[in-house]
Image (cartoon, rainbow, N blue to C red):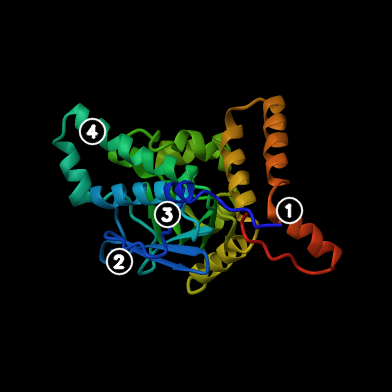
Amino acid sequence: MSEYQIDPALVAGNHKPLAGYQATHFQWQVADGVATITLNRPERKNPLTFESYAELRDLFHNLKWATDVKAVVLVGSGGNFCSGGDVHEIIGPLVALKAPELLMFTRMTGELVKMMRACPQPIIAAVDGVCAGAGAIMAMASDMRLATARSKTAFLFNRVGLAGCDMGACAFLPRIIGQGRASELLYTGRSLGGEEGERWGFFNRLCEPEAVLAEAQKLAADLAAGPSFANGITKTMLHQEWAMTIEQAIEAEAQAQAICMLTEDFSRAYHAFVAKQKPQFEGN
């Protein structure tokens, strides 16, 4: 029986290897299916610029088609995660803009969150030190968050005269930590410490500062070695089912699971179980 072949034209239009991508405004590395994005402006606690927002948005968009990236780790350098939008390169210029250009900016930042949620790869944020503003949003938009006790997460929009409804915060944050706790953070802009963040469920677990990146990469490697197609389905359903009734969700999951049952990974898992071996998943 001949091996199943995919039309090369279909592959060419839907596969975009990203291991060799050369990032401009942050560091990008791929090893064994795990991509690590490092925000690398440590002298300013890794703030974002117009350019880095746009590049991150486009990169997460392209991850939809990446066959060589199975999980993503997002981290900052120099003992901090991200201090948000750069005060001098973003906040200052925004004060002088008119409404159409301001809406262009806020839609661009929101698009980054959309792309983070739309890419099939699980995203793990490794949070240490300052995690504020857009940095807190990127941590929020990740699938899982590992942190340190010394981390300080602040949705500080209120403290700069803005509403807490930024980049989806009023939709995402209550679903992670509950309406009352999210309201407190978004109304006050206060910092959420690492231990409190773990108690509240914002962080999955705490790590030592010197180990948080390694722990995040290990978790990502475990996910990358798993059934990555099925993981992508799980991420899709976790996101889409927010807007479904229970009946709709059960039906959607029935269809999604039936698709996963057609994968080679499902067959591999069965045969490995029969042979009393560990399955070697390949993501197809």
Question: Would you place residue 150 above or below residue 193 in this image?
Answer: below
Q: Who comes first in sequence, dot 2 or dot 3? A: 3
- Going by the numbered disc 2, the residue's amino acid type is Pro
Q: Who comes first in sequence, dot 4 or dot 3? A: 3
In this view, the residue in front, 225 or 200, is: 225
Separation of residues labelled 4 and 1 (CA atoms) = 48 Å
- Residue that badge 3 annotates: 16
Side of 44 relative to 75 (left or right): left
Task: Please give the label number shown on residue 266.
Answer: 1
Q: Nearer the viewer, mark 2 or mark 3?
A: 3
Question: Would you place residue 171 above or below residue 82 in this image?
Answer: above
Q: Who comes first in sequence, dot 2 or dot 1? A: 2
Residue 38 coordinates in the image, percent (x, y):
38, 63
Q: Who comes first in sequence, dot 3 or dot 1? A: 3
Element carrying mark 1 = helix
Q: Residue at x 28, y 52 (%)?
A: 52
Q: Nearer the viewer, mark 2 or mark 4?
A: 4
Residue 269 visible in image:
yes
Q: Nearer the viewer, mark 4 or mark 1?
A: 1
Q: Residue at x 84, y 67 (%)?
A: 275
Asked if the residue under mark 1 is in contact with the one under mark 2, i.e. CB atoms within 8 Å, the reply is no
Q: Who comes first in sequence, dot 2 or dot 4? A: 2
Q: Residue at x 17, y 37 (%)?
A: 95
- Residue that badge 4 annotates: 102
Element carrying mark 4 = helix
Residue 241 coordinates in the image, percent (x, y):
61, 33
